[in-house]
Image (spheres, rainbow, N blue to C red):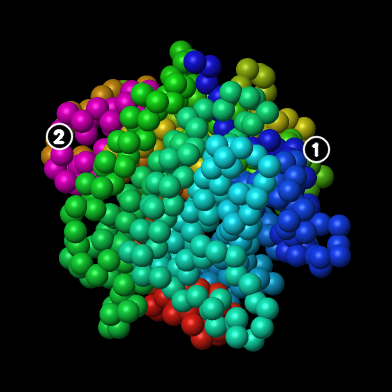
Amino acid sequence: MKYIKYSIIVACLSALLYMPSCEDFLEKPVSSDITVDSVFASKIRTEQFLWKVYSTASIYEFNGFWSGTDNRFYHYGASGSLVSVATDELEVEGTYAAIPKYMHTGTWNASTIDPGSWAIEFMSHVCYQGIRNANIFIENVDNSPFSDGEKAAMKAEAIFLRALMHFDLMQRLGGISVVDRVLKVSTAEDVEAIRIPRSTYAGTVDFIVKECEEAAKYLPDVYEDNKYLGRIVKGAALALKARVLLYAASPLFNPPDGQPYVAVSHPQVRELIGYPSYDKDRWRLAAEASKAVLDWAERESGWCRLYDEMADKRDNYEEIFINHTCPEVILSAGLLNNVTGYFELFMLPGNVAGPQNQTNPSNHAVTFNFTKYYRKTDGSDQTWDETEGQDYPYAQYRNKLAELEPRFQASAFYSGTEWAKGSGVVYHFYETNTNLLQNVRGVGFMRKFMKNAREGSVAPRWITFRLAEFYLNYAEALNEIDGDATEITAALNAVRTRAGLPAVSYTGTDHMRELIRRERTVEFAFEQHRFFDLRRWKTAGEEGNMKGDIYTLKLYGTNSVQDATYRLEKIADRVWEDKMYLYPFRQGEVNLGYIVQNPGW
């Protein structure tokens, strides 16, 4: 069967972003031209409103939307950077990025994530706007002129998107206010009904899982009409359920010693931030849910599979992120048609990818800390024996990086290589700073997602779920319950060998945990997984992860390749406190009196 990549039509989403808000669109007085009834009396308007739900309830983390009057742009990536800048993956230059200002210094709090400030990367009220739109659709689509089958499928899409936004909140905040209906206030007596307190963490997980199970009943495996690229399929509902259960089983929320990430004395608060006691069976549920995704891909979808169709492993890996019909991608979101404006400024290196007319690029750079996770192509570790402050020949820098596996070559643009493969134009970052490359805060710039990108080229899409995740999710969960060794290694090796690395044998639970986590770190570099993986594993506070010293390989020289050198240098010292494992609720929400703040904030 012909495979189809699912991403809502970019043009439709872009137009919807500039439509009036849901409240403006549907809450005009009865005498107005547009009412709830008139919207859902029309097939066209009903479908348009479903696209509105997509545009306000999807996860999109690239930086390319900026508005001085509409703070919803904070919902799309961090301010001026990817969220991965908060981890050991990336560093940035420039002054637009908020993560170095707040997260790296430990100065973020319940007020700096409020609307109106230069927020970090997330605004809970924007998720609830998407949830409200989904609820309006769910409560009204049955009045539309579609067939019963069509209405059930469309409602399932909105149920999934409502669940996705609840998950986006939960992965940062723990137990949240679950909103499964349209909130209305007509009189003063109605106010109390919309003051919804936080559900327990367990209650939030259960709600999302049930939403996914309900949606999966009615979602199709595939859409045959190409005009619907991007619509949610059954596999997406299974994928969200699997990720939620993996997170729920992990040490942050299901601690083996039963102890929360910070001291908590109140039992109610303890239940808001995780499970009060450990249950190994949660790992079994996570393993079964991930296996269900793999089984769906193989037996039901007719199209979904690990992408492994190109002989060159670097090209093959790059293709996942630039080919909108890649059969590995279960769900993605698009916001921009082409690379322009702020996307160039925030996402592309220096001035090598087109006339930006900017002098303050974010210049995402791959840290030396993160580079060390990549192995050489034979599966062995690279020798990193540099001493801080000592000069080493530039040729050694180039050779060591060139020996790293194909996923590094696809993910990092380092000195002495081409930005556009095959162009013949090689950049040496230490040369005259015409291209704004000289001050790179890492071993090289981020290349992943951006193969041959330049001004006017087709913009990449943000991948929400791809099949490789569920191979590694399955391996991780199965390993934690001492599951079948053959299945654990098969799932892990499916991803490793696709990347060109040799297969590994089973070596025991503890060592396999290290291998699986390292593989996950490399495979999902910069895809926002590590930002949450370090939290759920409770390793964010370990030296060099989200805390402590961050290093680069700094280049020195003029215009001579022979005379250029490099040094191992520290570029940052990041602050971490364990209260940061969960975000604070916005102070404005807590001040209302019915939201309990997370501990430590």
Look at the picture and state if 142 lies above or below 478.
below
Q: Name, please, the residue furthest toward the top.
A: 311
- Please state the horizontal and vertical placement of residue 494, each as a whole percent of the image: 32, 26
Mark 2: which secondary structure? loop
Neighbourhood count class around disc 1 (C-alpha, 10 Å): few under 14, some 14–19, many 20 upward: few
Q: Which amino acid does the dot numbered 1 rest on? A: Pro
Cα–Cα span, label 1 and label 2: 54 Å
Q: Main secondary structure of the magenta part?
A: helix
Q: Which amino acid does the dot numbered 2 rest on? A: Asp
Q: Nearer the viewer, residue 303 or 449?
A: 303
Q: Nearer the viewer, residue 264 or 23?
A: 23
Q: What is the span of residues highlighted in magenta in the rendered image?
A: 475-498
Q: Residue at x 19, y 59 (%)?
A: 279
Q: Nearer the viewer, residue 31 or 54?
A: 31
Instruction: Mark yes or no: residue 404 visible.
Output: no
- Which image quarter: residue 182? bottom right
Please indicate whether residue 297 sits to the left or right of residue 219 in the image.
Answer: left
User: Quick check: is 497 in the magenta stretch?
Assistant: yes
Instruction: Mark yes or no: residue 273 visible.
Output: yes
- Please state the horizontal and vertical placement of residue 555, each as a whole percent of the image: 55, 42
User: Quick check: is 73 in the magenta stretch?
Assistant: no
The quadrant in which the C terminus is found is: bottom left
- Which image quarter: residue 475? top left
- Please state the horizontal and vertical placement of residue 408, each as a whole percent of the image: 46, 32
- Which image quarter: residue 250? bottom left
Say whether disc 1 or disc 2 marks the residue closer to the N-terminus: 1
Q: Residue at x 75, y 65 (%)?
A: 27
Numbered disc in front, either 1 or 2: 2
Q: Residue at x 55, y 64 (%)?
A: 181
| Residue at which label 2 appears | 484
| Residue at which label 1 appears | 355
